[in-house]
Image (tube, rainbow, N blue to C red):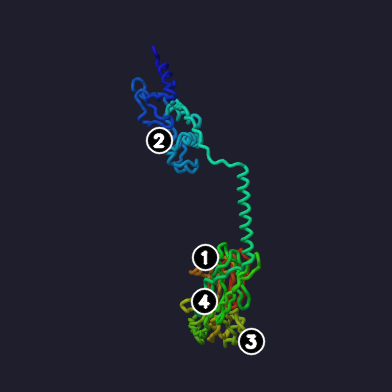
């Protein structure tokens, strides 16, 4: 009598059919050993339940449920696990659902299981073993052996004797050397070519706004191209195709150029050099016209820096200067030390601003810091050839305290009290101001400033520049209460 084990052993042995070995048929219920059967469809009453139809008491949970439970215990989601294990979340989800067909293959699956088991605190060998048990054990298919076909003998081709090969190589070498020598002789005997592609004419007239011109042409590869002009020369080299390009500056009026090509190997110049004349018309430059809108003639200022603004036509820049004309009658010398200076004394450094595209110009970002007295403000608008000037006469008679704070060399935090009251523009918490910002504060008796960087905070009191009163990065509080000198306080 044949037992079940004998039948299986017999079925597992290969059968010989002719000259081929046929692999055994897999047992029922198993597919390709590299693919895992569907977990739900593979469960049968005999495998999932005891003899009485109830679930087995000691059977471990499926691997997918173990992985899901372990991740829940760890308290992480699939995306956190993806970042920690470097395994895509969709692959981790397939392992937790038992859908192994969504994975790239058995080799990757085992690697994913080992890494995921280590991450979840499980035994990787035991996890891989359970995966193998759940997917079933199927003997690998044996290869089919076929009898190889005899190799047909190739037809005899052309055969060359050593003498023929040597003769052919010598012939090729002699021909190549002769051709190279011929080329060299022709090259040394012939000067380089030079052809202009831009401009094609010898004389060119451009628009009056032109400031440069680009020459292009062709010559031999690697040729040195030289363009001689008034005041010097420019050079470039032709590329591997012989093309070259070179840009030169132009002056107004007549510009003459001589273009030459030189072979760098032989030193020969082009037989005929190119001569080009480019004319840029000279137009008469009109003088600027501009207005000075502020300050108004005869105005007396009591507080603040003096902004100067206006509009200009045919001008690119405006330069603003100030000259001291004398003291103001009845003004207190304690609020402006410059009131004792002689007439004609230059004021602060000149301020130059660029005229905008709409013709406006403004020095508000860098106003004039003037002391007590009478002043003449001069504004000069200029273009490349001409200029125009306007003047205004004003007076400075400070009342109370006028303090200009300028941030230089970095940012600084500022908090300000005006007449012992927090300035609303800065607030109780203070503000941080960037490099270059200018602030103006006016009070009846005093202005007190708390700065986070004393070396980056520059002060101008009633038109008199005091500069920075401390060191960079050091927080300090300074009280300005003229006629007394600035003093450090403990206010914060």
Q: Name the residue under label 4.
A: 201
Q: Nearer the viewer, mark 2 or mark 4?
A: 4
Q: Is residue 266 left or right of 74 when viewed as pictured?
A: right
In the displayed image of the protein, which residue is found farthest to the top?
1
- The disc label shown at residue 342, or none: 3
Judging depth in this view, the residue of 63 and 72 nearest the camera is: 63
Instruction: Give the mark, 2 or 4, whose residue is nearer the N terminus.
Output: 2
Residue sitting at 60 percent across and 48 percent down?
168
Instruction: Give the mark, 1 or 4, whose residue is nearer the N terminus.
Output: 4
Using the rendered image of the protein, determine whether residue 169 is visible from the camera's viewpoint.
yes
Instruction: Give the mark, 1 or 2, whose residue is nearer the N terminus.
Output: 2
Instruction: Give the mark, 3 or 2, whose residue is nearer the N terminus.
Output: 2
CA separation, marks 3 and 2? Answer: 97 Å
CA separation, marks 4 and 3? Answer: 66 Å
Judging depth in this view, the residue of 341 and 110 nearest the camera is: 110
In the figure, 3 relative to 75: above or below?
A: above
Q: Nearer the viewer, mark 4 or mark 3?
A: 4
- The disc label shown at residue 431, or none: 1
Under circle 4, the secondary element is loop
Residue sitting at 39 percent across and 13 percent down?
2
CA separation, marks 1 and 2? Answer: 60 Å
Under circle 1, the secondary element is strand
Q: Where is residue 451 in the image (x, y as percent from the top left)?
A: 57, 66
- The disc label shown at residue 99, or none: 2
- Do the residues under discs 3 and 2 have CB atoms within 8 angstroms? no
């Amino acid at each position: 009598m044949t037992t079940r084990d004998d039948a299986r052993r017999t079925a597992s042995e290969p059968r010989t059919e002719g000259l081929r070995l046929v692999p055994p048929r897999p047992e029922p219920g198993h597919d390709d050993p590299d693919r895992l059967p569907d977990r739900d469809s593979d469960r049968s009453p005999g495998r999932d339940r005891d003899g009485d139809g109830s679930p087995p008491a000691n059977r471990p949970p499926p691997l997918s449920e173990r992985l899901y439970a372990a991740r829940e215990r760890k308290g992480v989601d699939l995306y956190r696990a993806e970042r920690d294990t470097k395994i895509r979340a969709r692959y981790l989800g397939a392992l937790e659902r038992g859908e192994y067909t969504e994975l790239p293959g058995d080799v990757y699956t085992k690697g994913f299981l080992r890494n995921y088991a280590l991450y979840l605190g499980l035994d990787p060998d035991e996890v891989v073993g359970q995966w193998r048990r759940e997917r079933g054990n199927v003997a690998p298919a044996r290869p089919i052996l076929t009898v190889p076909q005899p190799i047909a003998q190739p037809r005899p081709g052309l055969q060359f004797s050593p003498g023929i090969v040597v003769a052919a190589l010598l012939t090729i070498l002699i021909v190549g050397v002769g051709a190279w020598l011929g080329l060299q002789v022709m090259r040394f005997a012939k000067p380089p070519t030079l052809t202009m592609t831009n401009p094609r004419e010898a004389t060119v007239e451009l628009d009056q706004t032109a400031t440069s011109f680009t020459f292009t042409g062709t010559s031999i590869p690697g040729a040195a191209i030289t363009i001689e002009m008034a005041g010097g020369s420019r050079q470039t080299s032709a590329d591997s195709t012989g093309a070259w390009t070179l840009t030169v500056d132009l002056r107004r009026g007549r510009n003459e150029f001589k273009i030459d090509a030189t072979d760098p190997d032989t030193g020969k110049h082009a037989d005929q050099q190119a001569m080009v004349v480019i004319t840029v018309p000279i137009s008469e430059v009109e003088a600027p016209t501009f207005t000075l809108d502020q300050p108004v003639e005869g105005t007396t200022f009591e507080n603040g820096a003096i902004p100067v603004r206006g509009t200009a036509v045919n001008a690119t820049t405006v330069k603003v200067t100030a000259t001291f004309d004398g003291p103001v009658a009845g003004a207190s010398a304690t609020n402006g030390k410059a009131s004792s200076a002689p007439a004609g004394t230059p004021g602060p450094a000149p301020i130059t601003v660029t005229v905008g595209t709409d013709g406006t110009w403004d020095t508000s970002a860098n106003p004039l810091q003037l002391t007590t007295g009478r002043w003449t403000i001069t504004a000069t608008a200029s273009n490349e050839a001409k200029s125009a000037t306007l003047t205004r006469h004003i007076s400075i008679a400070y009342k109370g305290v006028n303090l200009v704070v300028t941030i230089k060399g970095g940012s600084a935090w500022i908090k300000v009290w005006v007449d012992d009251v927090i300035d609303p523009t800065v607030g109780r918490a203070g503000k941080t101001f960037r490099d270059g910002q200018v602030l103006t504060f006016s009070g009846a008796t005093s202005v007190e400033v708390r700065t986070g960087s004393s070396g980056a905070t520059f002060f101008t009191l009633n038109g008199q520049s005091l500069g920075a009163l401390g060191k960079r990065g050091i927080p300090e509080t300074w009280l300005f209460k003229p006629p007394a000198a600035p003093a450090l306080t403990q206010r914060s």
